[in-house]
Image: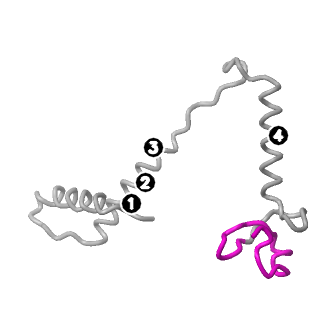
Amino acid sequence: MGFTSHQVVDAVREIQRLNSGEGGTDVSATDIMTVLLREDHHQTTEALNVPETRTAEEIGGATFDDTDLILEENRQLQEQRQCKVCREFDSTVAFLPCGHIVCCTDCAPAMRKCPVC
C-alpha cells in the first residue's frame, strides 16, 4: 500500500475542510490514514464493478475455433508454470538475483544456480 504526496495533501485538505466548522485545525496521522483508506476502498470498489456476462449466442461470434485457441493458450500457460526439472509440479521457487521461477520446492534445493541462466 502506498499513497502519493498528492493523495496525502488532498486528504489533509479534506480533514481541514471537515474540521473548519468545529474550529479544530489539528490533523492526526490516524485521520489522514482513515481518509486515504476510505478513498482507496472507494476506488477499488469502483474498479471491481464487473460488467454482466453474456452467452455465446448473445456475442454471436464465438466459434469452436475460438474455444480451441483458448484451450491451446491454457495448455501453454500450464506448461510454462510447470517445473523445468521434474515436469511434475508447479514452479514455486524464485532464484536470485535473476528472479526466474522455474523449479518446484522439491527440485530447487538440488540446484546451485538457476537452470535457465
Tell me which label, 1 or 4, sits earlier in the chain: 1
Circle 3 is placed at which residue position?
46
Q: Is residue 83 positioned above or below 111 on the image?
A: above
Circle 2 is placed at which residue position?
41
Tell me which label, 3 or 2, sits earlier in the chain: 2
- Give the amino acid type for the residue marked by disc 1 in the picture: Leu
Q: Is residue 24 positioned above or below 68 on the image?
A: below
- Give the amino acid type for the residue marked by disc 4 in the picture: Glu
- Give the amino acid type for the residue marked by disc 3 in the picture: Glu
Q: CA distance from mark 2 to mark 4?
A: 37 Å
**Looking at the rendered structure, which numbered label has been put on residue 61?**
none
Q: CA distance from mark 1 to mark 2?
A: 6 Å
Residue at 72% across, 18% down: 57
User: In the image, 96: left or right of 46?
Assistant: right
Tell me which label, 2 or 4, sits earlier in the chain: 2
Mark 3 and mark 4 residues within 8 Å of each other at the beta carbon? no
Circle 4 is placed at which residue position?
72
Q: How many marks?
A: 4
